[in-house]
Amino acid sequence: MTTLSHPFEQFAERVLPSTLGEDVRCGFHMLARCHPLAREASLDFAERSEQIVFVVRGATKLVAHASESRDQVVAFHFAGEVFTVPEPDNYSYSVCALRECELLTFASPEFLRLAEGEAEIMRQLLDSTKLSLRRCREKTIALGRKTAGERVAVFLLGMARRIGVEQDGRVALELPMSRRDISESLGLTIETVSRQLSKLKDDGVIETTGRSGIVLLDCPDLQRRAGFLKRTA
Amino acid sequence: MTTLSHPFEQFAERVLPSTLGEDVRCGFHMLARCHPLAREASLDFAERSEQIVFVVRGATKLVAHASESRDQVVAFHFAGEVFTVPEPDNYSYSVCALRECELLTFASPEFLRLAEGEAEIMRQLLDSTKLSLRRCREKTIALGRKTAGERVAVFLLGMARRIGVEQDGRVALELPMSRRDISESLGLTIETVSRQLSKLKDDGVIETTGRSGIVLLDCPDLQRRAGFLKRTA
DNA sequence: CGTAGCCTTGAGGACCTTCAAGAGGAGTGG
DNA sequence: CCACTCCTCTTGAAGGTCCTCAAGGCTACG
C-alpha cells in the first residue's frame, strides 16, 4: 500500500530505479509538470513536442482529432499507467480526463536526454511503450476485421481485465467513460454501441445498473461473441 | 554505403553501439537466427515468445489471425527496420515475406536479458517501438474514422514517404504488396480497394503501370482526399 | 504464345449510420 | 425529500457505404 504521497514520488517509485543519483532524480523532478484536471478537462499538446504522461490518479482518454467532429479515442489510461502522446503531424492529439484526475507530464526529448545512459529507465519506457503497442495492435484488428457486436464484446472483456472486480465468476465494471467515448474508441456510433449493449442485456450476457455500471454474467459467452481465436481448437 | 556484409553485421551496425564489449556482442550473435524467406513464405511464432525482428533485405507484412480467413495486416516493414512480434494471446501473429527476403530474429526475453544495463540498445528498441506505435495509432485512426477513399489515399501517401521515388513533384511507387495485402491492411475488401484506385486513376490523381507500379501525380490532392487535419488552417 | 492467377467491374444485399423522437439518470432547487 | 430539468442514453425508421457474389480482363510468367 502506498500512502498518499506527492505525485512525483509515485512516479519515481513506478519508473525510476532506487539506485538513481539524487541529482538526476532532481532533474526529473524539475522537468515534471503536474496537471490537476477536472472531469472532461483536456490537455492539448498541439504546439509542443512528444510528451510522456503518468496518470497519478483518475482515468483518461488519449484522443486524436482526425477532422472537425471526427475524433478517435486512441486509448484509455488509468491510474498508475505511463504512456506517450505523439507530437502532432497528420493529426493532433490531446489527453482528456474521464473523471477528475491528476497527471504528471514530461517533455519527451528532455526526459530522454536526462535518462541517457540509464538502462533501467529506458527499460521501463520500453515496457510501457510495448504495452501501448500491443493494445493498439489489438484495437487495429478489432477496427479492421470485426463487426459492431464483436467490438463491443472485445471492449467489455478488455475493460474487465483492467478495471473489473471479479466475484464468483461474474465481473462487475464501473465504466468511467460515456457511450460517446466508447463509440469513438470502437469506430462506431453512439447508437450502435447502445443497441449492441441492449442486445447483450436481452440475451442475458450482461446486466446494467445505471449508466456506468455493468456486470458481465457470462464471460465465456462474451469470449465467443468477441470473435477471438479458439484456444487449442 | 554499406557493402554486402553478413546479416548480423548489418543488424549490429543498426542497433548495437560500437563500444559494446566483444563478449556481449557475441552473445547477441549466438541468439540471432537467420531466416531466408521466399516470396509468400511466412514465419509463424504461434508457440514461441515475443520476437524481435530485423529485416535484412526485402519487404514483409506482420499479420494477425483474427479467425479463419479473417486476417488483419498490422504493419508492413522494409529493409533496415526493426519491429517486435507479440506473443500470441487473443490472436496469433506471423511475419510473411512480400518479396524474397532475409530476416534476423531474436527471442525477446533472452535479448532483453543480454541487453540489461545497455542503455543505448534499450534506446534503439524504444525508438523502434515508438515508431511502430505511432504508425499503429495512425492506422487506428484510419480504420476507426475514415472512409474507403480516405484510407486508400492515406495508404498511398504513407507508402510514398517510405518507399517512394520523387522526381519533379511526382512520386513513383513500386508496391511490393498485392491488392489483398492492401485490403487486409486497410480493413476493406480487395474489390473496394480496386474501385478506389480506379476512381483515383479516372480523376487523374494517379497513374498505374502494371500491377504494382503507381505514380502519384497530385500529392496535394491526395492529401485532401486523405482527410488529414489542415495544417495552419 | 498460352495459361494461371490477380485484378477489375458490375449488380444486389447487409450492416452500420443518420435522422428523429422518446425514456431514464443524475444533479439541483424548492 | 421530492419534483424538476438537462443531458445522456435508448429505440425506431430510412438511407448510404461497403461487402458479397459473379463474371470478365489483364498481367506476369512459363
Image (spheres, coloured by chain):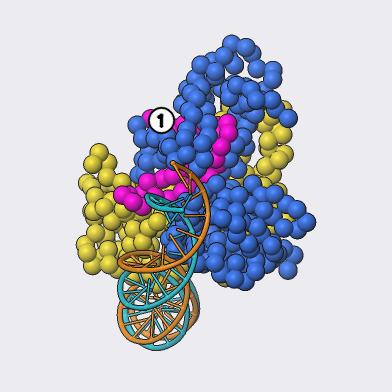
Chain colours: A yellow, B blue, C cyan, D orange
User: Residue B133: x and y, percent?
Assistant: 56, 45
Q: Which residue is mark 1?
A: B49
For the record, the magenta segment spans B48-77
Judging depth in this view, the residue of A8 and B125 nearest the camera is: B125
* Relative to B22, residue D15 above or below: below
Task: Decide whether residue A105 is among the magenta residues.
Answer: no
Judging depth in this view, the residue of B8 and A18 nearest the camera is: B8
Q: Is residue A77 left or right of residue C4?
A: right
The mark total stands at 1
Please name the amino acid that badge 1 sits on: Ser
Residue at (38, 38) in percent of width and height: B88
Q: Residue furthest top?
A: B23
Does the magenta stretch mainly form a helix, a strand or a loop? strand
Q: Residue furthest right?
A: B168
* Relative to B34, residue A104 above or below: below
Q: Residues within 10 Å of mark 1 (few under 14, many from 20)?
A: some
Q: Secondary structure at mark 1?
A: loop
Residue A129: quarter of image: top right
